[in-house]
Image (cartoon, rainbow, N blue to C red):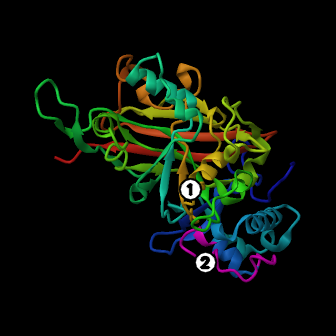
Amino acid sequence: MGLKSFVEVLPDSHFPIENLPYGVFKPEPGSKARPGVAIGDYVLDLSVIASAGLFDGPILCNSDCFDQPNLNKFLELGRPAWKEARATLQKLLSPTEPALRDNASLRQKALVPVDKAQMLLPIAIGDYTDFFASMHHAKNCGTIFRGPQNPINPNWFHLPIAYHGRASSIVISGTDIVRPRGQSYPTGNSPPYFGPSQKLDFELEMAAIVGPGNELGKPVDVNEAADHIFGLVLMNDWSARDIQAWEYVPLGPFLGKSFGTTLSPWIVTLDALEPFACDGPKQDPHPLPYLAEKIHVNYDISLEVRISPTGEEHSHVVTRSNFKHLYWTVTQQLAHHTINGCNLRPGDLLGTGTISGPEPESYGCLLELAWNGQKPLSLGGTTRKFLEDGDEVIFTGCCKGNGYNVGFGTCSGKILPSPP
């Protein structure tokens, strides 16, 4: 695109003018939460820009969507408003537009150094659904638990499998995660084990943020589903594998998942990701008509997981994967979610499920990387079968453009000991 900003953006920054991801922040302790976009090492305060009358397009000029403590009202306005905001912000930040560039007092109020900002969850999440959309992850899990003969159940290739997660325990990056306690498989004739999880894991996921919803009883057409998705975030859906293994028959995950899910603070819009669209996977058998997309795309987003073991300063890369490894696209996931008439609402979160690639170094969780503890993972001078107290897990995601990046920043969390 060859865009430039009057705000200095370093070459390796995740947040050039081509990106402009949305978040919610407090500029200083005690101030009220407000929406912003990331530009270089700054957060542009959208409440200040709106108060100055700089959102002058037909949709946003009289809207109070940026005078809110979350982005839900903006999400509800839909793609025309999102495009108008993006065009306005790219113009305001360009080197040739004086309105912000030449107004020193406005610039000082509007541009907050990102290291001074307290990032918050950007949306009020009413409902959270977690899919199981990576074929490589499904195959590995099936092989570990059921053997290699028929690792993936036949229904998996016909519909995006999902379950309903817990919205209340979704937290912003940097929040500590307390090791959960629960039951797990008994040994011999003993009662079930009860205590801190012995198999605590991360899951490399991304999540789609729902924009406009749909009415109850009215499904979203798969070819219109992209208009209901505002953007994507990084997501770590922490998992207690031992608790989950004991509880999941017959109704699926519950306490093994609901203790914590971590999101990155910046929502990268589908508009910013458009240059990185790539062909979606070949799907065999061909999906049923309601899932058959005219435009079948994924996004080329490089994903990386690092673990900083307890007591160590250095982190170790354990996974390099890519969003394009998903078998079911986010638009297919959303269309399937609504096909029974279920109504989605602005701010709903749709997790992709663990994103594993075909190679061992691209597996998206320790269950796969250490093969359920059979092949301990080397982290410098130590090893891991599963996470230990004090371990920090850091996700990053980035698209590589021609001379610029469109990135997601980081999604991190540290494990704290289970309470006594």
Q: Which residues are magenta?
A: 54-73
Q: Crowding at label 2, few (<14), some or many (≥20) Cα neighbours within 10 Å?
A: some
Q: Earlier in the sequence, mark 1 or mark 2?
A: 2
Q: Residue at x 41, y 52 (%)?
A: 175
The residue tagged 1 is: 340
Q: Please state the horizontal and vertical placement of residue 396, each as a whole percent of the image.
A: 57, 40
Give the image quarter of residue 339. Answer: bottom right
Instruction: Say which mark, if any, is on residue 67.
Output: 2
Q: Looking at the image, which is closer to me, 152 or 113?
A: 152
In the rendered structure, the answer to whether residue 3 lies left or right of residue 365 reads right
**Label 1 packing within 10 angstroms: few (<14), some (14-19), many (20+):** few
Res 257 → quadrant: top left
**Cα separation between marks 1 and 2:** 35 Å
Q: Position of residue 154 (x, y in %)?
A: 53, 29
Instruction: Determine the main secondary structure of the stretch shown in magenta.
Output: loop
- Residue 70 belongs to the span the image colors magenta: yes
Q: How many marks?
A: 2
146 with respect to 31 (left or right): left
Magenta stretch contains residue 335:
no
Question: 410 above or below 158?
Answer: below
**What residue lies at 70% left-to-right and 44% top-to-bottom?**
289
The residue closer to the viewer here, 248 or 403, is: 248
Nearer mark to the viewer, of 1 and 2: 1
Element class at badge 2: loop
> Could you tell me the amino acid type at mark 1?
Asn
Q: Amino acid at mark 2?
A: Asp
